[in-house]
Image (cartoon, coloured by chain):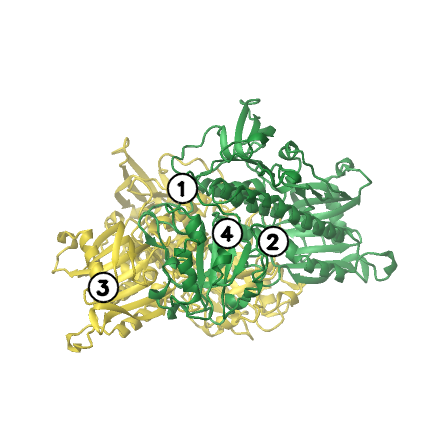
Chain colours: A green, B yellow
Amino acid sequence: MDRMQFHLNGFRTGDPAISEPAEGQQARAERPGSEVDVLIVGCGPAGLTLATQMAAFPDITTAIVEQKAGPLQLGQADGIACRSVEMYEALGFSEQILKEAYWVNETTFWKPDDANREHIVRSGRIQDVEDGLSEFPHVILNQARVHDFLLEAMRRGSSRLEPYYSRRLLDLTVDVSIAEDSDAHPVTAKLERIDPGHEGEIETVRARYVVGTDGARSTVRGSIGRSLSGDSANQAWGVMDVLVVTDFPDIRFKSAIYSNEGNVLIIPREGGYLVRLYIELDKLKESERVSERNITIERLIAAAQRIFRPYAFDVKEVAWWSVYEIGQRLCDKFDDVPEAEVGRRRPRVFIAGDACHTHSPKAGQGMNVSIADAFNLGWKLAAVLRGTSSPGLLHSYSDERQTIAKELIEFDRAFAKLISTPPKDPANPDAGGIDPAEFQQAFVQAGRFTAGMAVHYGPSLITAEPTHQHLARGFELGTRFHSAPVIRYWDAKRVHLGHTIKADGRWRLLAFAGADDPGSSRSRLGRLCEFLAESPDSPIRKYTSPDTDIDAVIDVRAIVQRDHRELAAELIPPLLVPQKGRYGLRDYEKLFCTELNGEADIFEQRGIDRADGCIVVVRPDQFVANILPLDGTSELAAFFDRFMIVSSSSVMSVPA
Amino acid sequence: MDRMQFHLNGFRTGDPAISEPAEGQQARAERPGSEVDVLIVGCGPAGLTLATQMAAFPDITTAIVEQKAGPLQLGQADGIACRSVEMYEALGFSEQILKEAYWVNETTFWKPDDANREHIVRSGRIQDVEDGLSEFPHVILNQARVHDFLLEAMRRGSSRLEPYYSRRLLDLTVDVSIAEDSDAHPVTAKLERIDPGHEGEIETVRARYVVGTDGARSTVRGSIGRSLSGDSANQAWGVMDVLVVTDFPDIRFKSAIYSNEGNVLIIPREGGYLVRLYIELDKLKESERVSERNITIERLIAAAQRIFRPYAFDVKEVAWWSVYEIGQRLCDKFDDVPEAEVGRRRPRVFIAGDACHTHSPKAGQGMNVSIADAFNLGWKLAAVLRGTSSPGLLHSYSDERQTIAKELIEFDRAFAKLISTPPKDPANPDAGGIDPAEFQQAFVQAGRFTAGMAVHYGPSLITAEPTHQHLARGFELGTRFHSAPVIRYWDAKRVHLGHTIKADGRWRLLAFAGADDPGSSRSRLGRLCEFLAESPDSPIRKYTSPDTDIDAVIDVRAIVQRDHRELAAELIPPLLVPQKGRYGLRDYEKLFCTELNGEADIFEQRGIDRADGCIVVVRPDQFVANILPLDGTSELAAFFDRFMIVSSSSVMSVPA
């Protein structure tokens, strides 16, 4: 289903963002069911994102539990990278984020004034996100609000998910003897209630899969015998959210201040008044913890006041503050299957977010990487549970995300070190330090990482080799599908092609027509559609149950190099106006044109071969999985045959 | 308050769209209070829009009652003009409308095929809204959803409004002897409960003001001795919302079909599948009502099938249908004060929406004009109730809106006639009818009316003569402020200047700086700010209580012809970075720049004098009230002196 399509199976009233409930949906039970498909432990950003994703599948039972007594009120994370906003678009609430958040438009840099090194002066300013990197901005919004949106989206999903709070995971065991039985619930979780009146009650939940999103001290991680490892940089930092009166002119810009008194990173916050400051504190001694220092908020404020000189910095209210030491730690594998057993059994327990990697806050990675973990895992769990993909798919989660986490931690370590380096004094160059211009340059280079766009999955079961990359150079294999605007043929609406890719577990096959007449049945686009609709080798024919809509598993859309006013409707292949639902209503949202009043069109923006066109296969998590010639039908079939399985009669029906 | 500013008076958590409750806000009572400031009768679009507007004022008590038992489930109106989306932006939920609605991008036209006049062929297509008319599109969304958004916005407002359902207005009286006592509650309404268990209970509510938004059969209108008058065109139409399978290629375009079998107007609906059809039926006899014809849905469908030939038109489900005759009716005055008494007393009872004007549905006027009525009235009621404006202001509601309603009804009559005229047959030109090309041309000309942009209030107490119109030709006096993008100085965010004008009852003074250095205190902008902040003649000094924020009554913002990177913060007049709230926090959202990466800037787009700049005074309902030179301080003071009154100590404090 497209999120803003409704009425397909009959007219309905009310809020269309609330999905129709799963059949037989009951009022939420007092306690999680004793058998569930997926148990998620922990209501941080990773857990809630995963739960929101799973809530879209009415045929999958999911429970999410949390040790705390209720939703987060005050979050620590705040930066939402462009890529994360893209994921929230796919989950259905990007517009709420964009409305409430602070938008990071520019970053400014400050350094000691050469004339008076006790004072700071502005040394430069840069655009925060390079042009065209994403259609969404980099924004700042309190983590608690992001949780609110996710909780609301979960509640609105088909399976109407809500967390069970006040549950502490006591232990988790996997019955390896039945782990390969696809009907089994081999994971047993024991939960202890800690809410008043129920203290000590034990709930036992047997699950097909368990995901630990239970933070840096993850119990799930411990239960599968894994641990975080890495070093601590022995550098203490303070962070505070404050309401402040200041004449510092860049208090509403993200700013990096290098001063002789230490460094500060300013992150303006939503709502127009609040600001977050990361303040560099002392180097810690070997194995010393910041908590041993008894650092007070007064000390943080005093440090800020010294750094901001000559500007006044009068703190009126402290909304939240904390001190921490920088540390990057990583788990070597993100599931329960030892490397040696990968070929023999599927993973049953996964860890995501802080449970498997921790970052310093300043590169803005923590929450964003956690969300991306969940976005990678959700569709894979759904595909295996719904019987459309082979269980081997599940190994790709750790393969892909552990590699990315490692890259990001390396980046984060370098970035954190950069921020902690003192500025070079031109009067005393031998004393060391970094040139402010060099610092600014490093910030610019870090842009793709901080925007969440540096993720590149290597070739695997689900990501093809870049054999045909030249057909669409701007859709790099293994990177996220980079959206661009197109005109919808049937109603001339300008839409972002990437926003048709919702988090609904479906694969996308985007057919970019070549120069031959797309309105002719003998065009390459026409022949591709014919193959997909009619050939027994077609992945659509093979992997879509005849009881469901033709786009339930693989969603085909086409983009033609034409003005929508000049393409005759009669000649459009039927696959591109499929009849769906109980009435056989036509879906008019599959075909797009390129005229954009003189702007560069998607073929130009993404380097698509105008003569030959191509097929771009996009994973359910929006990553480019394959690029093929329009007539590459056997390669296309072979690609899906690698991981898809013919749907058996026992599989629950796919929702419309 | 700006809708997306928060934390001004201290950090708060939770949904910022939910205003802080009014002081002493109680749980909603079982019944409306016996004394209220404003009683609104009727929960249609006008009533709910007015209530949403009133909910923003914590110091005003409002009750809204409705005869039906609960919110609308299925609405009749559907078209939302660009101007209405602008008002919803000011009320805080345009993004929800834009997300859910169908966007009207093009309108297509069909006529009889000259080769076979039993068949239709496409004769043309036009862009639905001319470029640059509004930053918002023309959209289609079920009225019930618009009500949902308004109800939600009311609930979130400071005074947490919710309607009292199942209340029938029995009668309404105004005690004229005390109507000029500003402390009095001279209007007495008797309401009868009609909900099960409470039938027949009478609730008496005394109000300072009553607004009848109770539809075409308005009881409020009757109680003030007014009536609708106008003719009926004796043309029956059918309307149906259907799920249909058809090969008609423009089923997702707004389309006007002229056929030998009658005319159809297609309005595609939200959600991708539903479509509304307006179908021309027979001419009625003199004084015949359509209800006497016993027209069935089968007959409507059969008519559509004949009109659509050669295309199939297979209706799968009828979501809603109705038949009606076209009629345009109008009330001669929209309040309770007879023309002869206007100088002697203020209005106490108003009517708005269908209670004072009815339209045919096809020009898409009904709901949009109703909303605009409410938007015109709301701030005026608030200003008089809060003691910032003289009661004479209230006469301008009927003056302005009755004139507009009359214009729109004339337009609507011409438009409805046009749609009912048969097409000219080239083989038989003497038989009469309209040339399809002429029809299309008339549609284009109607664009400004249907977009809601034809509204032009004449000079009055609150709209100045166009003496200085040449300083900003694109901000025509008496028309709505036409927004354009600008860059916010303090955080480089690109924003729409018009979106800073929220429905919060405040006047706006937009100072467009001339060519002289805006950063200098001797610039015209600098001197204007100095006058406003310090002169005893300044309307800000005169009309703003010292206990409230400096922008609580008149909100000053400035736009400079500069790149934000080239204007020194130190030189910005303090009035443009005002200190507000309990902490004296600086408001960083008052100053804007114009660099837009090569796009035409607001000075160019709106014809603002680049050398001299100007002041644009904007009413709380977003209409341009005055244009003055930057040094026109005495004219400015005189303008506000016409209708503002010095706030007395008895006035309740204005919320931040």
How packed is label 4: few (under 14 Cα within 10 Å), some, or many (20 or more)?
A: many
Question: Measured along the vertical axis of the image, is residue A248 above or below residue A601?
Answer: above
Left or right: B522 with respect to A554? right
Residues at circles 1 and 4 in contact by the CB criterion of under 8 Å:
no
The three-letter code of the residue at mark 4 reads Phe
Same chain shared by disc 1 and disc 3: no
The mark that comes first in sequence, 2 or 1, is 2
Q: Nearer the viewer, mark 1 or mark 4?
A: 4
Q: Secondary structure at mark 3?
A: loop
The three-letter code of the residue at mark 1 reads Ser
Left or right: B493 with respect to B32? right
**Which residue has dot 3 on it?**
B309
**Which residue has dot 1 on it?**
A653
Pointer 2 chain: A
Same chain shared by disc 2 and disc 1: yes
**Which residue has dot 4 on it?**
A640
Instruction: For residue B623, say whether it is visible.
Output: no
Q: Nearer the viewer, mark 2 or mark 1?
A: 2
How packed is label 2: few (under 14 Cα within 10 Å), some, or many (20 or more)?
A: some
Q: Nearer the viewer, mark 3 or mark 4?
A: 4
Pointer 3 chain: B
The three-letter code of the residue at mark 3 reads Arg
- Residue at 40% x, 69% y: name it: B130
Distance from the alpha carbon under mark 1 to that under mark 3: 38 Å
